[in-house]
């Protein structure tokens, strides 16, 4: 009789476990919005049973809170439920006919019990939306009211105190989100507007806005997990009786875009509750870069064994916690070392009791984003008082991307033992791997005191029979103990530590149990074939004003002349169209087969050609606007040959992020892609460029045709990507750029 084999993660001897992809606790736990009590309104567009339509016209949107606070359409301007999706889930689409006229839905809050927001002393609200530009000649105005709550009914002209969530356009603060408090003569509070908060943007992305209002005390606002406004003065006390979505109560500021989910509570949520609701929404709707910034310390990884606690300071040295990115993991994303320090809280959390221990196992899945020029960076976990006694696991070693393990004994003059995996087993930026490291005591009859074994993706790749046993101490996750340097920069899906050596069978079971989860994480295509990887949004590599560091193993840093770093989402370099450019070293263009990819946004394509990328004076690799005719199409050229030139006349609008790819196959074809879709193919028999040359970014190599706009990401592969791989890269980055 056959049995189904189902591998499981061992828990015997598990002393701590951090998991960024599932198994959340506290603020990281995935919970239903109704689990916290006080839910007064819950509109969920992904639940098709709750969106009532006549054809594609939405007539009613049913409340899932249990309070029957349903929304109904206002007048005959119907939102659409026509298959439009956000993150592969259906959304309600609001399409205005003008700035002051658009689809609107309205509803009321039942007066039964304490259902009405503010009735119990305050309220909390959450909304997921995706904004787009206005049509019908309104250009980039992009101003709209997404949701409003008021003391009076829609269309009555008597609204009392109101609170409103708005997106701003070019006539105000472009792409900003503002939460306003409106009354007779009242000022706006809890606002994201203003130059100081230029990182809080809707920017056509999937956007999560949270608002917590404590009547008479304070109001706070967050956008995608980032703290925005904080009005601490006495604010109006109120109880809201009505709401509308898609416009404000006066029907004067129509919203253009998709509304995905709306949740309102009739109470002030705690920070833990608020973050748990945010996490539910961010994970569900795939909100890009959620809580990876200034206030990511609010959402730190938690030890699932309850043995470890997080402390963000050690003496005078402050540590910055990484963020949790739903569905991906624990993200370390800065240039100064974003990491966690944690103490063992109980005897069960200790690797051993005192001094050194004979056995230990560490497992983790990670991808590193970048590494510094020395190649000796990136601590995953350590308890080493730098090069004193303890242990350390890091990327780097003596070569880029190699895993390095070291232990030091506890003597006054410590003896170190170390191990580096072979170069053939290294990883590059964007390449995920599951690592397992085992320290095992030899026993009375063994020829060794302690053995160290390293497994990569379930396969033994390195071992040593002459190793110091690890030491028991407090631990540092993401950087050397008590040090601000050599910090890991990348993504960590999970990390587990055992106070014993796992068996071969346990190692295999643990690997197989996690493999499917890791395989499901979005990834860039063919990371080992990347020849150049410039990403302004990724931290690390000591990014400065004049150096744009290459995250590929080639260390082909670009020198930046003129462009300024824009600190918003996404981070990017702004080119002025006059004399700004960046240029790499001289080892890019000699590629028989290649793929060039770029994320860019035009400020003004004007009436003449502009150059985004050019390698070599003879147009060995070239992507520029104009299509040779001064229009807002694209031209792709390989090796300076007319035979390889592909003109794509597809219009690319100003002020929108786009992803363009050029794929050259030696002696076969030149292909152009935009946002993952094929623009065209030029068949030819021409060979690829054979002369190495710098890659100019933002200009032609002959110091002409300067680009006016923003460039955030440039990648060059030394292979011709398939169409599926081009789309894979697009899908990996798209949420960051509002697609």
Image: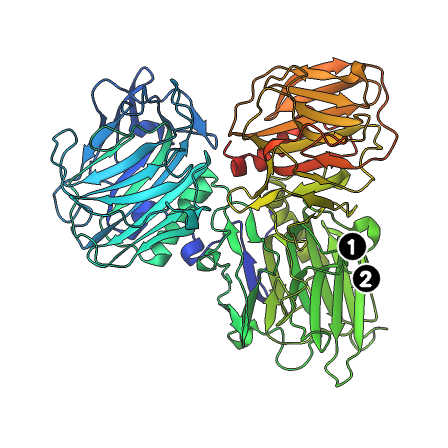
Q: Is residue 262 left or right of residue 237?
A: right
The residue positioned 70% from the left and 26% from the top of the image is: 623
Q: Residues within 10 Å of mark 2 (few under 14, many from 20)?
A: some
Tell me: residue 612, above or below residue 304: above
The residue beneath circle 1 is 460
The residue nearer to you, when weighing 533 against 585, is 585
Indicate the position of residue 462 as horizontal and vertical percent values. Answer: 81, 58
Q: Is residue 221 left or right of residue 520?
A: left
Q: Residues within 10 Å of mark 1 (few under 14, many from 20)?
A: few
Indicate the position of residue 165 as horizontal and vertical percent values. Answer: 30, 40
Is there a contact, CB below 8 Å, between mark 1 and mark 2? yes
Q: Secondary structure at mark 1?
A: strand
Indicate the position of residue 239 as horizontal and vertical percent values. Answer: 15, 47
Residue 505 visible in the displayed image: no
| Disc on res. 337 | none
Q: Is residue 25 left or right of residue 113?
A: right
Q: Secondary structure at mark 2?
A: strand
| Disc on res. 463 | 2
Tell me: residue 710, above or below residue 485: above
The residue nearer to you, when weighing 414 against 179, is 179
The quarter in which the N terminus is drawn is top right
The residue nearer to you, when weighing 442 against 149, is 149
Q: CA distance from mark 1 to mark 2?
A: 8 Å
């Amino acid at each position: 009789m056959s049995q189904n084999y189902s591998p499981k993660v061992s828990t015997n001897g598990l002393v701590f476990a951090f998991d960024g992809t599932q198994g959340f606790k506290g603020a990281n736990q995935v919970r239903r919005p109704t689990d916290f009590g006080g839910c007064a309104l819950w509109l969920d567009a992904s639940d098709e049973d709750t969106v009532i339509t006549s054809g594609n016209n939405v007539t009613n949107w049913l409340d899932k809170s249990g309070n029957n606070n349903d929304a109904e359409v206002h007048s005959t301007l119907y939102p659409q439920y026509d298959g439009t999706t956000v993150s592969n889930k259906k959304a309600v689409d609001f399409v205005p006919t003008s700035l002051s006229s658009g689809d609107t839905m309205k509803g009321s809050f039942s007066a039964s019990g304490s259902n009405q927001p503010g009735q119990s002393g305050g309220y909390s609200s959450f909304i997921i939306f995706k904004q787009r530009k206005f049509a019908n000649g309104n250009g980039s105005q992009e101003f709209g009211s997404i949701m409003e709550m008021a003391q009076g009914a829609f269309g009555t002209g008597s609204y009392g105190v109101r609170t409103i969530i708005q997106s701003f356009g070019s006539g105000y603060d472009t792409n900003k989100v503002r939460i306003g408090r409106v009354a007779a003569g009242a000022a706006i509070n809890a606002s994201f507007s203003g130059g100081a908060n230029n990182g809080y943007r809707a920017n056509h992305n999937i956007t999560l806005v949270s608002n917590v209002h404590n009547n008479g005390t304070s109001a706070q606002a967050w956008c995608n997990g980032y703290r925005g406004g904080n009005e601490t003065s006495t604010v109006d006390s109120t109880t809201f009786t009505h709401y509308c979505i898609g416009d404000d109560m006066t029907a004067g500021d129509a919203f253009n875009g998709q509304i995905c989910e709306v949740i309102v509570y009739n109470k002030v949520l705690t920070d833990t509750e608020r973050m748990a609701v945010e996490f539910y929404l961010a994970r569900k709707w795939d909100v890009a870069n959620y809580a990876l910034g200034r206030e990511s310390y609010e959402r730190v990884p938690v030890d699932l064994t309850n043995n470890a606690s997080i402390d963000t300071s050690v003496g005078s040295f402050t540590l910055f916690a990484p963020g949790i990115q739903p569905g991906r993991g624990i993200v370390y994303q800065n240039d100064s070392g974003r990491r966690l320090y944690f103490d063992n809280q109980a005897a069960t959390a200790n690797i051993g009791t005192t001094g050194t221990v004979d056995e230990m196992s560490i497992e983790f899945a990670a991808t590193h984003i970048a590494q510094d020029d020395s190649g000796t960076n990136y601590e995953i976990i350590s308890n080493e008082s730098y090069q004193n006694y303890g242990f350390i696991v890091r990327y780097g070693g003596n070569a880029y991307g190699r895993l390095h393990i070291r232990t030091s004994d506890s003597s006054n003059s410590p003896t170190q033992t170390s191990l580096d995996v072979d170069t053939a087993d290294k990883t590059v930026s964007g390449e995920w791997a599951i690592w397992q490291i085992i320290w095992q005591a030899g026993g009375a009859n063994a020829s060794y005191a302690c053995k160290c074994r390293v497994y990569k993706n379930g396969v033994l790749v390195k071992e040593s029979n002459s190793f110091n046993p690890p030491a028991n101490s407090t631990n540092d996750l993401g950087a050397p103990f008590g040090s601000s340097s050599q910090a890991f920069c990348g993504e960590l899906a999970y990390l587990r530590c055992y106070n014993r050596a796992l068996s071969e069978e346990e190692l295999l079971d643990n690997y197989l149990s996690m493999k499917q989860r890791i395989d499901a994480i979005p990834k860039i295509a063919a990371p080992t074939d990347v020849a150049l990887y410039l990403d302004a949004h990724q931290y690390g590599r000591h990014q400065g004003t004049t150096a744009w560091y290459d995250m590929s193993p080639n260390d082909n840093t670009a020198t930046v002349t003129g462009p300024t770093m824009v600190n918003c989402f996404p981070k990017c370099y702004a080119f002025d169209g006059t004399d700004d450019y960046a240029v790499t070293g001289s080892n890019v263009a000699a590629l028989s087969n290649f793929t060039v990819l770029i994320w860019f946004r035009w400020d003004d394509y004007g009436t003449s050609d502009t150059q985004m990328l050019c390698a070599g004076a003879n147009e060995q690799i070239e992507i520029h606007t104009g299509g040779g005719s001064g229009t807002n199409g694209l031209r792709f050229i390989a090796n300076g040959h007319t035979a390889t030139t592909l003109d794509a006349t597809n219009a690319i609008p100003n002020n929108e992020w786009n992803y363009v790819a050029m794929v050259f196959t030696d002696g076969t074809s030149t292909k152009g892609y935009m946002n993952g879709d094929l623009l065209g193919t030029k068949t030819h028999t021409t060979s690829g460029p054979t002369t190495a040359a710098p890659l100019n970014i933002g200009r032609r190599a002959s110091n002409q045709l300067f680009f006016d706009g923003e460039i955030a990401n440039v990648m060059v592969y030394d292979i011709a990507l398939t169409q599926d791989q081009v789309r894979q890269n697009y899908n990996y980055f798209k949420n960051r750029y509002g697609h």
